[in-house]
Image (tube, rainbow, N blue to C red):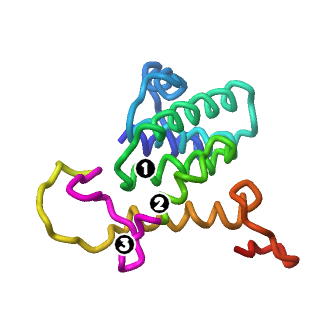
Amino acid sequence: MIDNKWTLYAVAPETVKFSEKQKAEFFDGDFWQGRKLTHQLWGLIHLRRTQGPSEKVDSLIEHICNRLTTELKYDFAVVDIYIQKIAFVLKAGHPEKIKRRWIERVIANQADDGGWNDRWYFLRSRRRPIFDFDNPPSDRHATIQGLWLLYQVKYRYPEHFGLEKTPQGQSGN
């Protein structure tokens, strides 16, 4: 899958064979949509980590973060892709682009079993839309993303989101 190939390219470029078209698409900030866009960002974050910062990659990361946060303004379903957009923008180093309200929505949509779902009311995000009244258990993928998002809020960017740091360097709220 192309999005896995991007991350592999970022961590071990010698093992990946990209066509010129695939390489151009990886570095095109306007080509991809939806999950491919968040996974493109993921690959670029790892590329920056392994290859070091560059103006081209940093600019592309910021452009994609801007696209994702523009989408977040209009996303109404709090499902795994909503959580993923926020978590990836934070991982990219742009907490200033994330509204506290978006974090609050994620927290408010935590399921009774402690996790998060890929379903919001009757909408599924990773599968075909479904219409039923069952209350499914949390989804592992969405739950891990939710926990990772909140970890970043609490331990990486506590001041940005109005949390206090304790003297031991841990977040207090």
Q: Is residue 77 above or below residue 173?
A: above
Give percent across and percent down for residue 2. 39, 37
The numbered disc on residue 82 is 1
Q: Secondary structure at mark 2?
A: helix
173 sits left or right of 68 in the view: right
Residue beneath disc 2: 106
Task: Name the amino acid type tagged 2.
Answer: Val
* Three-letter amino acid code at the position of disc 3: Ala
Q: Residue at x 11, y 61 (%)?
A: 132
The disc, 1 or 2, on the residue closer to the chain's N-terminal end is 1
Q: Which residues are magenta?
A: 108-125
Q: Nearer the viewer, residue 53 or 74?
A: 74
Q: Disc 2 to disc 3, how far (Cα)?
A: 10 Å
Q: CA distance from mark 1 to mark 2?
A: 8 Å
Q: Is residue 47 left or right of residue 67?
A: right
Q: Is residue 163 above or below residue 126?
A: below
Q: Label 3, secondary structure: give it.
A: loop
